Image (cartoon, grey):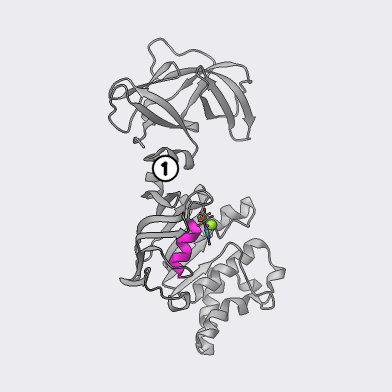
Amino acid sequence: MAAVELKGLSKRYGAAVAVDDVSLRVEHGQLVCLLGPSGCGKTTTLRLIAGFIEPSAGEIEVGGKVLSSPSRTVPPEGRKMSMIFQSYALWPHMTVAENVAYGLKIRKLDRATIDAKLKAILSTARLEALADRYPGELSGGQQQRVSLARALVVEPETLLLDEPLSNLDANLREEMRFEIRRLHDQYRYTTVYVTHDQAEAMTTADLIAVMNKGRVEQLGPPEEIYTRPRSEFVARFIGGSNVLAATALDEVRVSVAGGALRTTGRSLSAGRPVAVSVRQHEIGIALEPPSSGAENHLQGTVTRQVFLGSTRDYTVTLADGTELRVTAPPGRNIAPGQSVWLHLPAEQCRALAEE
Ligand code: ADP
Ligand code: MG
């Protein structure tokens, strides 16, 4: 059993903190995504786990054994880990089969064992027909599958993936997300998967750790992260939320841009500032004013509108200048300059924790 546990892990470069007191446990067989914007410390965390760099503080345990600490760090070759980088780094002069089998050869396994393992992984990764090709004769997605197969075949205790799909085009990226999850379900290696792409994390992960400025800001299953963001950062980063600056009127209602909204999520104290998040596609947009007494409506003006095929994307500016993004069905076309009424359903207006 090889759970990976980060305990108070930090990495400093001079005065700059790349990873700041991260604690995180990845259970055996689990796939955890580190999700966050560029520069938030994802790659540094992964390199710490792999043993390429030493922590400034904290520890990394794998299967209960300390592999990294400021005083002692086991080098990468002493860890049963495979790491896949953004660039696939296949050997150009070796065929697909030779690339994949390389890790088995240097472990000096016998010919029959190597052949059996190679055959199994090529089949799983759907690479049998390409076994004798060279990397230069493969598409990006095929090269990515070779890179995955090469990492999986050595049966690592831990698999580390750093933005493995970022060099692929959009369609292929989508397909490969499912592919990675499928391979994970088959092999169940303890996996840490780094990405800045929300959809990639939602598709592949058992747990998502949202990172911001070197810290884990929220950890939870994809659905929980999406439906119950705890901070403004997570709400904005995950799934297109608007975040409104409001003032509490009582325990559940806030005043914002000259209107009032009933909110959910926590109990408010009157007079306190509160950030309220609401997703773009939860907002209704109409030309007609609501019936009198209807709650949770705000008036604004369409300032931008984009047709995206399956949806229309509006920017609506409220009386106080606040801009809201609204994703609406494509059928109705409301032109910029039009005055509109927005409906922000109370159960979708989440009062976020105070920072
Ligand atoms: P991410 O992978 O999330 O984009 P990184 O882990 O690569 O982020 O980097 C986190 C922060 O640490 C960045 O501000 C980066 O500039 C800094 N950093 C990373 N590696 C080094 C290094 N070797 N020396 C100095 N600063 C570094
Ligand atoms: Mg990175």
- Residue placed at 58% from the left, 69% from the top? 147
* Residue 211 in sight in this render: yes
Q: Identify the residue position indicated by label 1 in the image.
A: 226
Q: Amino acid at mark 1?
A: Tyr
Q: Is residue 136 above or below residue 241?
A: below
Side of 216 relative to 154 (left or right): left
- Residue placed at 38% from the left, 62% from the top? 30
Secondary structure of the residue carrying tag 1 is: helix
Query: How many residues crowd around disc 1 within 10 Å: few (fewer than 14), some, or many (20 or more)?
Result: some
Q: Is residue 80 above or below residue 143?
A: below
Q: Is residue 177 above or below residue 325?
A: below
Q: State the quadrant of the N terminus.
A: bottom left
- Residue placed at 46% from the left, 69% from the top? 50
Residue 140: % across, % down:
65, 62
How many numbered badges does the structure rendering display? 1
* Residue 206 in sight in this render: no
Residue 201: % across, % down:
48, 52
Locate residue 31: give its quadrant: bottom left
Side of 339 relative to 193 (left or right): right
Between 6 and 305, the one nearer to me in the picture = 6
Residue 238: % across, % down:
47, 42
Q: Is residue 354 above or below residue 335?
A: below
Q: Which residues are magenta?
A: 42-51
